[in-house]
Image: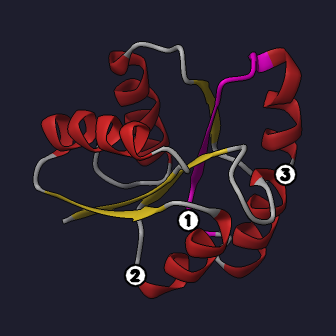
Amino acid sequence: MLKILIADDHEFIREGLKKILIDEFSPVHIGEAEDTDRLLALAPTEEWNIIISDISMPGKGGIEALSILKEQQPHIPVLILSIYPKDQYADNVLNAGAAGYLNKDSAPAELVQVVKEILNKDGLRG
């Protein structure tokens, strides 16, 4: 079963992401984190296929959390979501080890496509 960890400090964003992902990837197990401390605590608890994380959350901050995730579990791809345009942060997060960067203004179909591409690139189902 596909396992996805979603990290965002806004519950309605997490709920929307869950619905999109469940509709597309069912059966899927989804974990949730509301801040970077919870993200970093949950990440090592299961064999996640992908982590989808907001760049701006309470705690350490998205880029620092990404750096820690990539040190601790470099095999888990991380997709960064942000309200900021790609030209502001995409290069930084990709250089820090993210598997992708997606603006929150993107259509649900684009999220699904990016997740599939990341999973297929890593030899997982998508």
Q: Amino acid at mark 1?
A: Ile
- Local packing at callout 3 (Cα closer than 10 Å; few below 14, some 14-19, many 20+) is some
**Between 78 and 15, the one nearer to me in the picture:** 15
Q: Which residue is mark 2?
A: 46
Measure how far apart labels 1 and 2 are at the Cα level: 11 Å
- Residue at the location (49% across, 44% down)? 10
Q: Position of residue 2 (x, y in %)?
A: 26, 60
First in residue order: circle 1 vs circle 2: 2
Judged from the image, the secondary structure of the residue bearing numbered disc 3 is loop
- Residue 76 bears which disc, if any? 1
Q: Is residue 106 above or below residue 18?
A: above
First in residue order: circle 3 vs circle 2: 2
- Magenta range is 75-86
- Residue 96 bears which disc, if any? 3
Judged from the image, the secondary structure of the residue bearing numbered disc 1 is loop
Q: Amino acid at mark 3?
A: Ala
> Would residue 82 be counted in the magenta stretch?
yes
Q: Is residue 7 above or below residue 11?
A: below
